[in-house]
Image (cartoon, grey):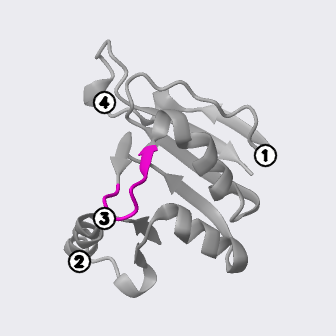
Amino acid sequence: MSVDRSETAIAWAKRNLALNSVLTDANTLVHAHVFDFLADARRRRRFDLAVVDPPSYSTTRVRGDAFDVAKDHPKLLEAVLAVMRPGGTIYFSTNHQRFEPRMEGLGASGVREITGRTIPEDYRSRKKTVHRCWLISV
């Protein structure tokens, strides 16, 4: 299941699934604001695995709200944790170049940075960090 509030991103994901011969009936694409989706899912769903890769910054004209990963990642991760089964796994990544994680207050059983294992080979020699990733155990 992929959730994105951007219709363009959902259409792109649909095309990529088709190009890679991935069955769309086994891969649900949801066009929704992630916080709305997670609030609804909290009442009726649980997940074993989540890949959380939010934009560094986004705004919505319709709702007039903004998301800043540097400021809002604890709120997002708490909402994801609320829909996870015990023993589940969350991968959280960001491309924000000056990101400072604030994950010590999360209700997770473990948080471990795994950036070194997730940086593409062609970015490993760069001096500036362009990507960071954590493994969060529920």
Q: Amino acid at mark 1?
A: Gly
Q: Label 1 belongs to which residue?
A: 107
Q: State how far apart marks 4 and 3 are (Cα).
A: 29 Å
Mark 2–mark 4 distance (CA, rounded to whole Å): 27 Å
The magenta segment = 60-67
Residue at image mark 4:
121
Q: Position of residue 92 (x, y in %)?
A: 53, 44
Q: Estimate how packed mark 2 is, as few (under 14), some (14 to 19) or many (20 or more) residues with alpha carbons within 10 Å.
A: few
- Mark 4 / mark 3, whichever is N-terminal: 3
Residue 6 image label: 3
Q: Earlier in the sequence, mark 1 or mark 4?
A: 1
Give me the C-alpha separation between circle 1 and circle 4: 33 Å
Q: Amino acid at mark 2?
A: Ala
Give the left or right position of residue 9, taking residue 45 as reference: left
Determine whether, in the image, residue 27 is placed left or right of residue 75.
left
Q: Principal SS element in the magenta part?
A: loop
In the picture as drawn, the residue positioned furthest to the bottom comes out as 25
Residue at 37% from the left image edge and 25% from the top image edge: 97
- Front-most of residues 11 and 113: 11
Residue under numbered circle 2: 18
Within 10 Å of the Cα at label 3, are there few (<14), some (14-19), or many (20+) other Cα atoms?
Answer: some
Tell whether label 2 touches label 3 (CB within 8 Å).
Answer: no
Quarter-wise, where is residue 38 in the image? bottom right
Q: Vertical placement of 12 versus 106: above or below? A: below
Tell us which disc is closer to us: 1 or 3: 3
Label 4 residue SS: helix
